[in-house]
Amino acid sequence: MRICIATSGSGGINDFVSTVFGRCPTFTIVDIEGNEIKNIRVIQNPGYVSGSGAGVLAAQEIVNEGCNVLISGSVGPNSYQVLMAGHIDMRASPPTSVKDAINLFLEGKLPVAVPVHGGGRRGMGMGMGRGHGPW
Amino acid sequence: MVGEGVEWEWVWEEVMDHGSMIIGVTGGKGGTGKSTFAVNISSLLSRKYRVKLIDADVECPNDHILFSKELKNEVRERIFIPSFNYQKCIKCSLCQKNCSENAIVMFKNGYPFLLPNLCSSCKTCYIVCPTKAIESGSKFIGSTFITEINENLTLVTGMLDPGQERSYPMVLRTLDRANEIKSEITIIDTSAGTGNHVAASLMDAEIVFAVTEETPLGLHDLEMIERLIEKMDKMYYVIVNRHGISDINIKEKVLGKIPYDERIAESYYRGIPAVEMFKNTDIENYFLEPLMEVGIWQR
Amino acid sequence: MAEIVVASGKGGVGKSTVLSSLAIFFREKNNAIVDGDAEAPNLHLLFDVEWSEEREYRGKSIAVIDYNKCNLCGKCAETCEYRAIKLKNNEIKILDYLCEGCLACAVICPERAISIKKDVYSGKIKIGKTEFGPFISPELEPGQSNSGKLVTEEKNIARSWKEKGIKNILVDSAAGIGCQVIASMGGSNYAILIAEPTKSSFSDMLRAYELAYHFRAKPFIIINKHDLNPDFDLIEKFSKEEDVEIIGKIPYDKNIPVSMAKRKPIFMYDPNSPSTRAMKDFFPTISSIFD
């Protein structure tokens, strides 16, 4: 299983989970074998420097990296659509360390993330990094 | 005050070219009286000329309310969005790479798909697709209306659907719809703000009136809208509304001052243009004078 | 953290007056104040802001023509959906105040004469202090398209102050219902909608209400200048039908423009003026929406 964690700094196992997804600077990607963390990698989030549609770019990257799970403080509405299409299991986490977040996830303690402003009456345009999470 | 000399003659030459005159009404700050001014001068001018008033404040169009009219002749307006023909698509990803809004998503080895709410309708994907796999689709963004106010005055209104972020294309649709109507004078009432949707509304205007109020807030925003109008190289004048509410007194570029007058407020509440409700009174002069000053009235 | 947005649809009906009063009345609640009107940002004029930081905002892309390569074929002008390219008398020009920075002209140009310049300076975000909390103000160059993004940026700055003890964000939204207002409303918990008792203000407030409903911001209504048109009952009817609470009514107050001219919120300028007294009366009923 491959987990991607949206990280708020330069990434890595000791970095912290970002409160936002589309515009977080880095993604820390780990593989879980058994219950062990293997192959820690850090990639730059292409959405971090993007003008518009940051969430979309970021989400595409996660899918293309072959991840199964995303852990982030929140997920915006556009990212959510793309991640859903890519069959990613999205989990919301408090801004704790990557290590703690992974452990919480493995213990089944991270709730499923919901897009903060998803599903309106008329399919309204959203985005612009307006997703923000419960934490 | 102003309105004499070379500048004005130049405008008339332009006007002669296409046989009608286009006046923009804007202001920067909201609620300074753009619509009140636009509605009243339209009403006045329609006594002499064939006039169309374009309500380009597509986010919150109000001019019909100031005439107590129901909007009529609705047309639902659409803009382009790409529609993918997967039989022709070769997954080259050019559409995705060239989309400046990142509205097109492509997974590894997958076909492209669209997030319609991000699409800005620029057609770049349509142009760039080497196999013509992108066809013209469309989505609704709002409605336009054509409402007859009196036999000489027609109102063209654009109304954006709530939740649509882009008012610019809606402004363009409204201006296009207005082409159905022939007129000698066109008045364009813009929205508040200084963004490119306001610039789009004023694109064809030959003379612009910036309506403001004498408060630091009004003046601050007036300065911003002046920068935009100057950038666009338009001739413009300032109209002060509700003059007398504070002791600030602006002078530069001012063509007319409409005093704070409860009668104007009353006409606003009742949905009758002040120049009609108080015909042949000093109220009429407040709106007539700026028009005389620049020679529109006595043409 | 509670995010409270003041909106109205129609401009000039009292958003800044109400927001400045809220900031003063609830000064103990650790609020950050955000001006959400990037195209006409003027809230800062009512506060004595001590500016401490400016962040450049480079959110714009514009098309640029290389005139050495251009052969004046005019395809770009035909293609531009925004009508930002004008070809007249053998001269071609891109109007930067209309250009959205898409790539359509660049990809259609047979001579490859057009390129897109990215990250063009389009404004700034100013951060400062007031005696009622930190203050964030945008300033967009005229003729821009991306005002909503700038507003989101501002709000993200305010959100990042959570660790510094900021508990609430007060956002003064722009007029209209476009991208700036959407950005102001998105993520907000509460929307305070201001309406005057006129049909146009009511109609615009309804449009702002639709947005609030969509973004799940709990709406409240304040009627401003209610005494100027006392027979107008559409707002009350709407409030009953849709079950949106009218939290208060503010009378017409001729001191407000005077206080503005003195660049002071009415709440400070005249604590005994009719509008201030009215707001002091009903503000306590919404103290629970603050964190």
Image (spheres, coloured by chain):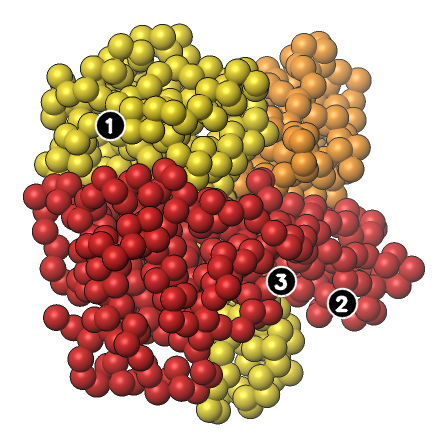
Chain colours: A orange, B red, C yellow
Q: Residue at (56%, 77%) from the top-left corner?
A: C77
Do the residues under discs 1 and 3 have CB atoms within 8 angstroms?
A: no
Q: Along the polypeptide, which appears first: circle 3 or circle 2?
A: 3
Subunit of label 2: B
Secondary element at tag 2 = loop
User: Residue B64: image x %, image y %?
Assistant: 48, 49
Residue A45 lies, with reference to residue B298, above or below; the image says: above
Subunit of label 1: C
Secondary element at tag 1 = loop
Residue C156 lies, with reference to residue C68, above or below; the image says: above
Q: Amino acid at mark 1?
A: Tyr
Please identify the residue farthest to the right as the structure is shown: B87
Q: Residue at (33%, 83%) from the top-left corner?
A: B12
Q: Which mark is residue B122?
A: 3
The number of numbered discs placed on residues in the rendered structure image is 3
Please identify the residue farthest to the front as the structure is shown: B280
Q: Amino acid at mark 2?
A: Cys
Q: Which residue is mark 1?
A: C252
**In whole angstroms, how far apart are the C-alphas of marks 3 and 2?**
14 Å
Q: Residue at (18%, 84%) from the top-left corner?
A: B5
2 or 1: mark nearer the eye:
1
Task: Please tell me how crowded label 1 is: few (under 14), some (14-19), or many (20+) other residues with Cα within 10 Å.
Answer: some
Which is more toward the observer, B274 or A135? B274
- Same chain? Circles 2 and 1: no
